[in-house]
Amino acid sequence: SYDLTQPPSVSVSPRQTARITCSGTSLAKKNVYWYQQKPGQAPVLVIYKVTERPSGIPERFSGSRSGTNVTLTVSGVQAEDEAEYYCQSADSSGTYVLFGGGTKLTVL
Amino acid sequence: QVQLVQSGAEVRKPGASVKISCKTSGYTASGHYIHWVRQAPGQGLEWMGWINPDSGGRNYVQKFQGRITITRDTSINTLYLELSRLNSDDTAVYFCARDAIVTGTLGDYYFDYWGQGTLVTVSS
């Protein structure tokens, strides 16, 4: 089981906005990170520290937080954004890494 | 450029051990922890532990205690994950990943570069 909860799947049409949530009791105070993983590939960091975007990641990827819920938003979804997305944080002690169960983003 | 290159696929019988490698390049190896993350077929990501390439200090997930050993060879900038007493549940792709934070700097663990993954199949 996971301490970070994500919806198993999200589906959107091209050019629409996709929102993927990650919830956890400690997330109101902890940093959260998002990774994109396409089949057969290693994960790629797309958002760090809740809202920051690494260089090279398109501006359509953004992050936000409301209470214990953190959201990855993909604005103007493109076919290439179809992938599995994982949130990541740490346990209450900050010692261990936690991953959410992953959300499959399908572009219709 | 930063690269993490892992060793090739392995097949083991139940009860055996496996040791996979992760060779780093393109940055100061002592400056970043290296983590190991695995992914069973069709499943999510599971963090296993880290090693400090500078000091050799390490931290493992309780679940793997007694079966996991993460080591390093600083002379060739290579990290190793060894997992013993394998069973079918250990069939997975194993990734090494670089911690984004420079060693000694306060901050969370998160990963900015990943190896390509190594498939370990446990089957009789």
Image (cartoon, grey):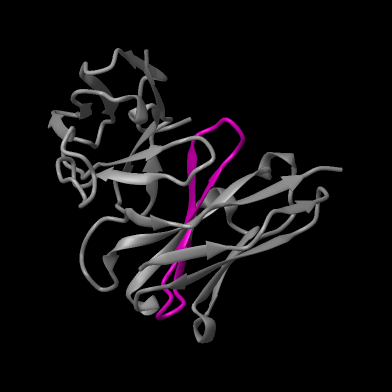
State whether residue A91 appears in this view. Answer: no
Tell me what residue is drawn at x 43 percent, y 65 percent: B3
Q: Position of residue A75 (x, y in %)?
A: 18, 25
Q: Is residue A26 left or right of residue A35?
A: left
Q: Is residue B1 magenta?
A: no
Report the front residue among B62 and B101. B101
Report the front residue among B118 and A2. B118
Q: Position of residue A81 (x, y in %)?
A: 33, 29
Which stretch appears magenta?
A: B36-59
Report the front residue among B78 and A22. B78
Residue extending furthest toward the bottom: B75
Q: Is residue A2 left or right of residue B27?
A: right
Q: Position of residue B9 (x, y in %)?
A: 69, 54
Number of numbered discs visible in the structure rendering: 0
Q: Is residue B58 magenta?
A: yes
Q: Position of residue B90 (x, y in %)?
A: 67, 45
Q: Is residue B11 left or right of residue A6?
A: right
- Displayed quadrant of residue B89: top right
Rendered view: B66 above or below A99: below
For the C terminus of chain A, the quadrant is: top left
- Displayed quadrant of residue B83: bottom right
State whether residue A74 appears in this view. Answer: yes
Tell me what residue is drawn at x 28 percent, y 30 percent: A24
Tell me what residue is drawn at x 35 percent, y 32 percent: A4
Tell me what residue is drawn at x 68 percent, y 43 percent: B91
Rendered view: B16 above or below B69: above
